[in-house]
Image (cartoon, rainbow, N blue to C red):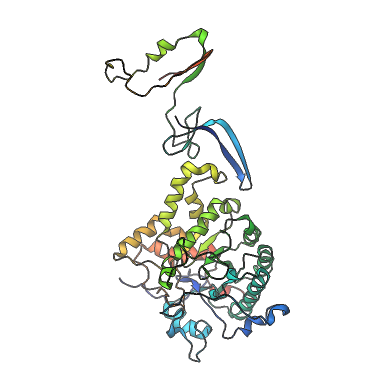
Amino acid sequence: MGKVTGTTSATDPEKVEWQDDGQILRCPWHGWEFDIATGESVFNPHKVRARSFDTAVESTSDNTSEESATDGGCDCGAVEGDQPPVDTYEVDVEDQQVVVYL
Amino acid sequence: MSGRQVEQSTGSEDTAPTLIDCDIHQKWKDPEEVIAYLPDQYKDRGVQSPSILYDNVAEFSRRDAIPDDGSPAGSSIEKMKEHHFEEFGVDYAVLTGNSYLNLTALPNRDYAAELAVANNKWVIDNWLSEGGPFVGSLLAAPQKPERMAEMIRELGDHPRVVQVVMPMASQHPYGHEYYWPMYEAAEEMGLPIAMHPYTEGHGVTRPPTGAGHPNTYFEWHTLLGTYAMGQLVSLVAEGVLAKFPDLNFVVIEGGLSWVPHFLWRMDKDWKALRAQVPYLQKPPSEYVRDQVRFTTQPIEEPDNPEHLLQILEMMHAEETVMFASDYPHWDTDSPMYALPPMADEMEHAVMAGNAQELYGLPNDPTSLPTN
């Protein structure tokens, strides 16, 4: 996951302002900046975009996580055995959960 | 390589210039000529500046450019005309002054500034007054920016003053806001600012290469372009080109084959590092393409001339490159043989068109007033 941050803007070299705090996602590889909501790059928003996914924050009282999780599975064969195929991390979600629709 | 044709007729009302030489060094016969223009408190000091520490075994000026009376190369208008202008059909000669002044090598800002002013008044009275092909530059001591701004406003409206020249070496990289009052004045007067090497590593300037002080003039001269890169990236990144959109810069005597490399690196890094320079509203290379011009000398000479042509195309030479000979210095480039054969349009742009546009020169040099 790239760093979620803000960025700067300026109309004059002597007046640089911090903006869009929490709205900018830096690519974890080269550090390019993208608008986290649209995937548009900051340096060339019309031509360079990151792939974006419909994303929602939903209450646990309306839990559809199991259903959603099956929607975006890759077609790369069943996983055999008990060990997960990639590194996994303990994640706790309290009250609300982030659902990414793939 | 075949040479280009010498145009026997210079520009006229109907004919655009075909050869504008953007780096011609004029010199005084005797420093007393300039001392006469110094304020009284500096007259005893005279013309005094840290000299170059690197010995050029090929000598700094061409022996064949020395006038018959033995006075310094570049000090005789008649010799210059006969030896260079008439020989090659130079329509305009952009005088870039005596780089031996090494103005930024001087630790005393006040003296450096007044020496610049004195030199410029001498140029106006003794060279630009000659008319003919001559247009000239105001030398600047940028370590005294407010005084230089005043000078630019005072002397910059002379019809044959076409630019300001700063030494390529400086105490701070030239993007620093310390220098901006001078840039503001130059933009206001419609004068490009050129940077010309010689001072690098001398007096109070920084080492002439990123690796430090080299051992020989051979190394010093090989790396002229690297100092230009340092100044240029500063002018772009500190927002000078963005803040002064009507101000142009000229890089003289840095060669040019490094320019594509430099532009590509800036644009690549800007994609990730844009947040450090958010006032740049377009890719950095576009500021350079729009506002910076490069003179050709000392042109690089690859074994295959086609390679140089490719580099000219990479840097949009039809917009960005202007011919310069550096006459009468030891590494003068020939207007006939220095550059590879080019398409007609690019050749005209490089040999005259880009300079005519940048400096706002009329077709007929004699139509420019001399005072």
Residue at screen point 57% across, 39% down? A8
Please state the horizontal and vertical placement of residue B344, each as a whole percent of the image: 38, 63
Query: Is B297 placed above or below B312 here?
Result: below
Q: Nearer the viewer, residue B207 or B359?
A: B207
Residue at screen point 60% across, 54% down? B244
Question: In the visual, does B46 lie left or right of A54?
Answer: right
Question: In the visual, does A61 lie left or right of B265?
Answer: right
Single out the residue that lies furthest toward the top.
A61
- Assign the N terminus of chain B to one quadrant of the image: bottom left
Q: Which of A33 and B201 is in front in this view?
A: B201
Query: Is B356 placed above or below B240 here?
Result: below
Residue at screen point 67% across, 64% down? B149
Please state the horizontal and vertical placement of residue B70, each as a whole percent of the image: 50, 90
- Assign the C terminus of chain B to one quadrant of the image: bottom right
Please state the horizontal and vertical placement of residue B116, each as a whole percent of the image: 63, 72
Q: Which of A20 and B324 is in front in this view?
A: A20
Q: Nearer the viewer, residue B145 or B313?
A: B145
Residue B315 appearing in the image: no
Residue A36 appearing in the image: yes
